[in-house]
């Protein structure tokens, strides 16, 4: 058990916890933010992607101790002051089918656009390739990212 | 979850529910059936189980089926809103729990739209008729002098209007009409238009709750260490280390393994890792995929059961100028929905309450009944949002786990599966082996078709033969038969069921005939489909949209396939290329569907895209194998999904139709695989007869 502090969606949090606990379960079970999904638990699918200090990370492969003192952003913290352009594009393109993978897709896409405001198809594929969607929404994801990039310009 | 107003009507539905059909319910005076509640000033008008309108104008549609990504959450209300002449912005949807009033609530067979279309139209039209009548009564005019639009009833005489909400009180006191007039489809203003998903926002802001996210107060979370090998049983286990994990509350053995019940997910996972488990070996400990394949091939020597026999294939074979014998083999496949299986159960005060992301609340009910031995009225099934189903959630194994675990606790328990447990405990698309013999006359016209199929034993052979007997090609002599072999690997319906295998075989074989007789694959199909206008419709449009026959860059080739399943028709043209390293790349998929009247075109396009991706995933990578009596695959590293880098461009088209609506979830899957394999054959000369492709050509 250790005492760990970090910022979650802009709010300071402190908790006493087994410091090997994956961040994913801390976010979901301790803070009740269930927008971040469990799917593979092995860092393969990206459904659990959150931002740590602005970088996309797979929360199932990170212990809570690794985020001590850092900023954690989940899907719930995105677009609180109105939808983020990526979310807006996702709605317009009707990207989501079941939707289960989409928090991870969106968090990864937002990080991509923060880095590369107008990505090429290749850059999109490179950033998004490891974020799996069993429903097969990839074509719309790619389209929506281009649309969001237009919006951000 | 439901709102409080809905609890009221839902309880009443149950009172009326047993044995009633919906047709009957619509004939009942629903408001009278409500008894005492009517005497209070009504704030809700609910002429049938599918909808209620409140005095603030909001309209609640109860969805009788499960939403798992196929977007019926939007398409079904569109049907009702069309006939109701509702203001779309006033529509809210609640998930209907298990209730006999809705008839079958199983979501499968691409049947939601097809089976609910008439019911929802009638439900909407009934309510509209009563609202118009209520307005006419209010204005003291003839109902024929009123019309309804966008949530209002208008008065032709004095040009006034009344909102639906303001008419709720009067409407609720009127008898429910037996017969209602439905709209002429030419007057549709909602059906056929692209509508945004009603839950679109909830899917992108993290607020939508799936089964895995479900929570009730005081709930515990459990994981089950399931018996790893087929036919094994639990010998003994040591839980002392597991119980040392602070959050772990209890370790209990259940029929499928050993459950670790904890205050939170991670404690349960840790506890499960600390279990020491011993299993009794069983009869299948040596079983592997090689043996299964051998047994399936071996079984083909049996005559088996005949599914279809036309003419005389033996005589036709002798008379043919050329014949070909081919054998195809397909592997087991897991559904691997993005959300692993899970279920929450709570047994309290003699009631077993279940919250399940299920495609079959009816099956969940039977699971709960089997485990508890409770009476029907002691079991309550709530359907939750599903993160991908594809047929996997038709099963009740994960419900039974949860109910059995809940029997050990006096708190609600959510039983969740880790990915490896989920993949290893699937109900797989069956493996099967197909022996085909075909021939042509001297003009290259097919003379006979013999298809003998070997698959695992099951209540119905259609799980691996489905679609084989629907061969539409004009081939005079046909014989289709199957044999079954007892195997311990559980099997189940996987998006398009038997069609995933039979379309692959049929459409590759037709292609073999075309190539060997030097006929264009589209032309040969057209010649043999003269009496099948809807097959021709999708085939012609696909050929046109894909520029079939036009020149392609070097190292590119096209393949085509057409297949009918679940009352819909789909044609696919696949374009592939070979990279410098000799790797096959899927460049483009052109998909055309005819699913009759389309409710929400965008939803159909999405289902076609998704179906194509699921088929490509299976064709290129999909394979569940058995080693030492258990499934070898455990996660997406050894059961890979298609990635964005492998995605072809997918262009989807819908044939305009006024036929009755059918479905779009499954039909795009079957023809995709053979179109791809036909393109590969055109490009490389290699006929792939064993799936998946994997590195067969490298
Ligand atoms: S759940 Fe973390 S990458 Fe799949
Ligand atoms: S939308 Fe269902 S997994 Fe991506």
Image (cartoon, rainbow, N blue to C red):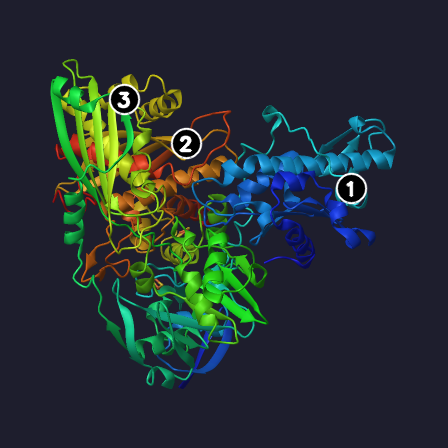
Q: Are marks 2 and 1 on the same chain?
A: yes
Residue A35 in view in this figure = no
Mark 1 falls within which chain? B
Residue at (54%, 43%) from the top-left corner? B74
Residue B250 image offset from top left, x and y in percent: 42, 80
Instruction: Identify the residue under disc 3.
Output: B525
Instruction: Identify the residue under disc 1.
Output: B171
Which image quadrant is residue B327 in? top left
Q: Is residue B514 left or right of residue B50?
A: left
* Sequence order check, earlier mark of 2 and 1: 1
Q: Residues within 10 Å of mark 2 (few under 14, many from 20)?
A: many
Residue B87 image offset from top left, x and y in percent: 67, 40
- Residue, far right: B140
Secondary structure at badge 1 equals helix
* Sequence order check, earlier mark of 1 and 3: 1
Q: Are marks 1 and 3 on the same chain?
A: yes
Establish whether ligand 2 lies closer than 8 Å to the Cβ of label 1. no
Vertical placement of residue B261 versus B609, above or below: below
The answer for how far apart the CA atoms under marks 2 and 1 are is 39 Å
Task: Please state which of residues B239 and B56 is positioned toward the viewer in this rendering.
Answer: B239
Looking at the rendered structure, which numbered label has been put on residue B568?
A: 2
Is label 3 in contact with label 2 (beta carbons under 8 Å)?
no
Q: Are marks 3 and 2 on the same chain?
A: yes
């Amino acid at each position: 058990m250790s005492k760990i502090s970090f910022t979650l969606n802009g709010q300071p949090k402190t908790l006493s916890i087994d410091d090997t606990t994956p961040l994913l379960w801390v976010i979901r079970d301790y803070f009740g933010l269930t927008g971040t999904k469990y799917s593979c638990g092995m860092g393969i699918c990206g459904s659990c992607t959150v931002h740590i200090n602005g970088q996309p990370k797979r929360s199932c492969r990170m212990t809570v101790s690794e985020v001590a003192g850092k900023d954690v952003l989940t899907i719930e913290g995105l677009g609180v002051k109105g939808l983020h352009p990526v979310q807006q594009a996702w709605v317009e393109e009707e990207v989501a089918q079941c939707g289960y993978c989409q928090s991870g897709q969106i968090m990864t896409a937002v990080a991509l656009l923060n880095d590369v405001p107008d990505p090429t198809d290749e850059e999109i594929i490179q950033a998004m390739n490891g974020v799996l969607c069993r429903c097969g929404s990839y074509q719309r994801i790619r389209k929506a990212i281009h649309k969001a990039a237009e919006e951000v310009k | 979850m439901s709102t409080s107003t809905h609890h009221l009507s839902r309880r009443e539905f149950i009172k009326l529910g047993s044995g009633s059909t919906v047709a009957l319910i619509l004939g009942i005076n629903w408001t009278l059936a409500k008894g005492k509640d009517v005497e209070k000033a009504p704030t809700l008008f609910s002429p049938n189980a599918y909808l209620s309108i409140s005095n603030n104008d909001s309209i609640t549609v109860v969805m009788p089926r499960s939403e798992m990504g196929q977007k019926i959450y939007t398409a079904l209300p569109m049907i009702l809103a069309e006939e109701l002449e509702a203001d779309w912005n006033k529509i809210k949807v609640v998930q209907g729990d298990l209730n006999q009033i809705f008839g079958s609530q199983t979501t499968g067979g691409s049947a939601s739209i097809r089976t609910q279309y008439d019911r929802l139209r009638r439900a909407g039209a009934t309510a509209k008729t009563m609202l118009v009548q209520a307005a006419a009564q209010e204005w003291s005019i003839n109902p024929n002098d009123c019309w309804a639009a966008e949530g209002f009833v208008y008065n032709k005489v004095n040009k006034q209007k009344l909102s639906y909400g303001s008419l709720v009180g009067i409407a609720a006191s009127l008898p429910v009409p037996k017969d209602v007039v439905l709209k002429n489809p030419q007057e549709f203003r909602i059906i056929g238009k692209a509508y945004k998903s009603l839950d679109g926002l909830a899917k992108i802001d993290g607020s939508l709750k799936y089964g895995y996210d479900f929570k009730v107060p005081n709930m515990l979370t459990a994981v089950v260490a399931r018996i790893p090998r087929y036919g094994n049983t639990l010998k003994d286990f040591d839980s002392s280390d597991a119980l040392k994990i602070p959050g772990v509350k209890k370790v209990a053995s259940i029929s499928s393994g050993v459950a670790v019940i904890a205050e939170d997910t991670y404690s349960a996972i840790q506890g499960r890792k600390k279990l020491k488990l011993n299993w009794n070996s069983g009869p299948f400990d040596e079983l592997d995929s090689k043996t299964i394949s051998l047994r399936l091939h071996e079984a083909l020597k049996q005559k088996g059961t005949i599914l279809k026999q036309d003419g005389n294939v033996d005589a036709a074979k002798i008379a043919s100028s050329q014949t070909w014998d081919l054998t195809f083999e397909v592997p087991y496949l897991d559904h691997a929905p993005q959300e692993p299986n899970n279920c929450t159960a709570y047994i309290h005060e003699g009631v077993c309450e279940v919250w399940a992301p299920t495609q079959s609340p009816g099956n969940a009910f039977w699971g709960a009944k089997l485990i508890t031995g409770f009476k029907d009225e002691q079991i309550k099934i709530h359907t939750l949002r599903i993160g991908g189903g594809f047929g996997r959630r038709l099963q009740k194994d994960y419900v039974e786990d949860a109910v059995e675990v809940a029997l050990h606790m006096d708190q609600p328990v959510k039983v969740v599966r880790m990915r490896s447990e989920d993949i290893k405990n699937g109900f797989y698309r069956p493996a099967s082996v197909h022996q085909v013999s075909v021939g042509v006359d001297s003009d290259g016209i097919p003379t006979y078709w013999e298809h003998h199929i070997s698959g695992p034993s099951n209540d119905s052979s259609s799980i691996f033969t489905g679609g084989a007997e629907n061969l539409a090609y004009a081939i005079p002599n046909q014989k289709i038969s199957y044999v079954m072999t007892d195997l311990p690997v559980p099997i189940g319906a996987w998006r398009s069921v038997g069609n995933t295998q039979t379309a692959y075989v049929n459409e590759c074989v037709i292609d073999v005939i075309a190539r060997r007789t030097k006929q264009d694959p589209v032309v040969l199909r057209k010649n043999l489909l003269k009496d099948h206008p809807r097959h021709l419709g999708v085939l012609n449009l696909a050929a046109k949209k894909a520029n079939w026959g036009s020149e392609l860059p070097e190292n590119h080739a096209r393949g085509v396939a057409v297949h009918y399943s679940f009352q819909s028709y789909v044609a696919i043209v696949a374009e592939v290329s070979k990279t410098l390293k000799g790797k096959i790349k899927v460049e483009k998929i052109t998909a055309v569907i005819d699913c009759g009247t389309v409710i929400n075109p965008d939803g159909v396009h999405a289902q076609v895209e998704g179906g194509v991706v699921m088929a490509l995933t299976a064709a290129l990578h999909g394979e569940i194998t058995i080693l030492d009596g258990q499934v070898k695959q455990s996660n997406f590293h050894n059961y890979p999904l298609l990635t964005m880098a492998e995605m072809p461009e997918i262009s989807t088209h819908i044939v305009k139709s006024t036929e009755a609506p059918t479905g779009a979830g499954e039909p795009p899957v079957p023809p995709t695989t053979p179109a791809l394999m036909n393109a590969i054959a055109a490009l490389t000369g290699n006929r792939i007869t064993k799936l998946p492709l994997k590195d067969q050509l490298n």
